[in-house]
Amino acid sequence: MQQGVHILTLRERPRYDGSQIEALKQQLGGPAAEDLVCRAAEELSLRISALERFHAAGDDIGVRKTARGLTGIAYQIGLHGVSDVASDVEHCAAREGLAAHVAQAATLARLVRVAETSLMKIWDIGEEVP
């Protein structure tokens, strides 16, 4: 039996609900909606960095609180995939033991991947907001 290293390509399409941005544009107007989306995207980036720090420090309470806040922000701007995975990170952090810590690390890595592609999508859309 031949053994070797297999490289897995991890690709996830961002789950994005454009109707959220449209609703924000209707409620706030184009410039205010663009400002809100940009601030939310920046906040998501900051919180993901904080999640990584909390995870590295073994601070499950920090992970849970930060992931919970990230879930709401992502949902507000239509990034439902990011919101769902952040919720998964929160659930992993609520568990104890080595398996839970490994699951948290894997789920956090997935969150970083999903958020990266989703934030690129949201920046592209932000440029289009009239």
Image (spheres, rainbow, N blue to C red):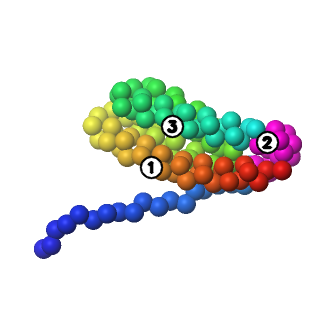
Residue 93 seen anywhere in this rendered image of the structure: yes
Q: Amino acid at mark 1?
A: Arg
Q: Position of residue 107 (x, y in %)?
A: 42, 46
Task: Give the farthest residue toward the left.
Answer: 1
Q: Report the predominant secondary structure element of the magenta stretch.
A: helix
* Residue with the mark numbered 3: 48
Task: Give the farthest residue toward the front.
Answer: 127
Residue 72 seen anywhere in this rendered image of the structure: no
Residue at the location (83% across, 50% down)? Answer: 130
Is residue 80 left or right of 5 when viewed as pictured?
Answer: right
Residue at the location (58% across, 44% down)? Answer: 83
Q: Position of residue 104 (x, y in %)?
A: 38, 40
Q: Position of residue 71 (x, y in %)?
A: 58, 39
* Figure label count: 3
Q: Dot 1 lies on which element?
A: helix
Tell me if residue 30 is in the magenta stretch.
Answer: yes
Q: Amino acid at mark 2?
A: Ala
Residue at the location (43% across, 35% down)? Answer: 52
Span of residues in magenta: 21-34
Q: Dot 2 lies on which element?
A: helix
Residue at the location (37% across, 46% down)? Answer: 106
* Numbered label attached to residue 33: 2
3 and 1 marks in contact (CB < 8 Å) = no
* Numbered label attached to residue 110: 1
Q: CA distance from mark 1 to mark 2?
A: 28 Å
Is residue 46 left or right of 29 when viewed as pictured?
Answer: left
